[in-house]
Amino acid sequence: MSFQIQTFELSFCPEETLLYSKADTQIASAVGTFGRVLECWDRQTREYVAIKVIRSIRKYRDAAMIEVDVLQQLAKNDKGRSHCVQILNWFDYRNHICIVFEKLGPSLFDYLKRNKYCPFPVDLVREIGRQLLESVAYMHSLCLIHTDLKPENILLVSPEYLKLPGYKRASQGETHFRCLPKSSEIKLIDFGSTAYDNQNHSSIVSTRHYRAPEVILGLGWSYPCDMWSVGCILVELCSGEALFQTHENLEHLAMMERNMISQYVPVGCSRSSIVDLLYGLLEFDPAERITARQALDHPFFRNIPA
C-alpha cells in the first residue's frame, strides 16, 4: 500500500545531543494544522517512534500541554484494554512541544481512500467497532470526552495488510484490488481537543461530518457527542462514504431529520442488528442516545454469526 510521504528537515546545532534522530535526510511525516508527526529513531530503545511536533504558537502549545496531561491520565489508569495510543515521552525543543508516541500503522481513512471508498467487511467493522467503543467507554469512565472521533484518528496498530480481489470493471475486464489489514487491532489518537466533563466547554467541537446535533444547535454537549461520532464512523466503514456530506448547518440538521441510516448498510446476515445499533448511536436526543457500555452489550457484538 502506498501512502503519501513528505520530506521534512530537522536542523540541529552540532553541539546539541539529541535522544531522537532521523535515519537520513528524509523522514515520513504527516502534516496537520497543529504541526506535523515525524517518524524518528530512538537511540536508547533502538526503535522507531512517532513524534508529534507542535507549531510554536501559544494556542497550539497550550492544546499540546492539555494533550500531554490527558495522555498521562490515560496511561496511568490503563489496564491494557484502553486502545489509546501510548505516550512515551515529551519535551520542549526550541519552543516546540514534542510528544513521543509508539509508532503505529495507517488510519482507517487511509484504508478507505486507498480502496476507493469501498466498504469494510462487516466482521472487520464489528472488531473495529468493539475496540473503538471500549476505548470511548474507558475515556468516559475517567470523565474524559474525546470530541474529535473520526476515521483519521483511529490507527491500525500494524501496517501489514492483505491484497484481495475487489471488483471487475466489466467494460475493460480489469480486476481492482483492495487492501485489508492483517490485524484488526486499533488505537485511538489525537487527544488535543479532549475535555473533562466538569470543565467549561467550547461551543463547537468535532469535525463537521461527525458533529452531533446538540453541538450544531448550541445546546451544550457531553459524553453523548462521542457516541454520535462513533455511529457516523460505523456507517462510513459499512458504506464507504460519510453519512452527512455537508458543510452547512441547516442542511446538516435536515439530513439528520431524514434519518436514512438503513440505506447505508449493505444487505447481509448482520444487517438488522447493526442497523438497530446505529439507530441507538444516532439518536437525535442526546439523553436517549445509548452509552458506550450499552453499545458494547448490543447483540451486534454478542451474537456473532457462525
Image (cartoon, rainbow, N blue to C red):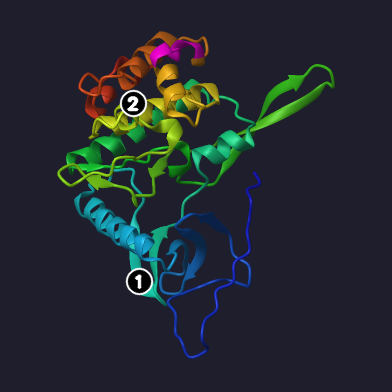
At x 51%, y 62%, the residue is: 38
Question: In this orientation, which residue lies closer to the viewer: 211 or 241?
Answer: 211
Q: Considering only vertical position in the picture, is 107 above or below 299?
A: below
Residue that extends furthest to the bottom in the rendered view of this protein: 15
Q: Which residue is mark 1?
A: 91
At x 63%, y 48%, the residue is: 3
Is residue 127 covered in magenta?
no
Q: Main secondary structure of the magenta part?
A: helix
Give percent across and percent down for residue 148. Answer: 37, 41
Question: For residue 213, which numbered disc appears in the image?
Answer: 2
Q: Earlier in the sequence, mark 1 or mark 2?
A: 1
Question: In this orientation, which residue lies closer to the viewer: 170 or 65?
Answer: 65
Identify the image quadrant of the C terminus: top left
Is residue 260 covered in magenta?
yes
Q: How far is disc 1 from disc 2 in space, using C-alphas?
A: 38 Å
Question: In this orientation, which residue lies closer to the viewer: 49 or 3?
Answer: 3
Identify the image quadrant of the N terminus: top right
185 left or right, relative to 181: left
Instruction: Give the secondary structure at mark 2.
Output: helix
1 left or right, relative to 44: right
Residue 206 quadrant: top left
Residue 240 quadrant: top right
Give percent across and percent down for residue 108. Answer: 50, 38
Give percent across and percent down for residue 5. Answer: 63, 56
Q: Considering only vertical position in the picture, is 137 above or below 196?
A: above
Whether residue 182 is visible to the viewer of this picture, yes or no, is no
Q: Which amino acid, by three-letter code, is at mark 1?
A: Phe
At x 31%, y 32%, the residue is: 215
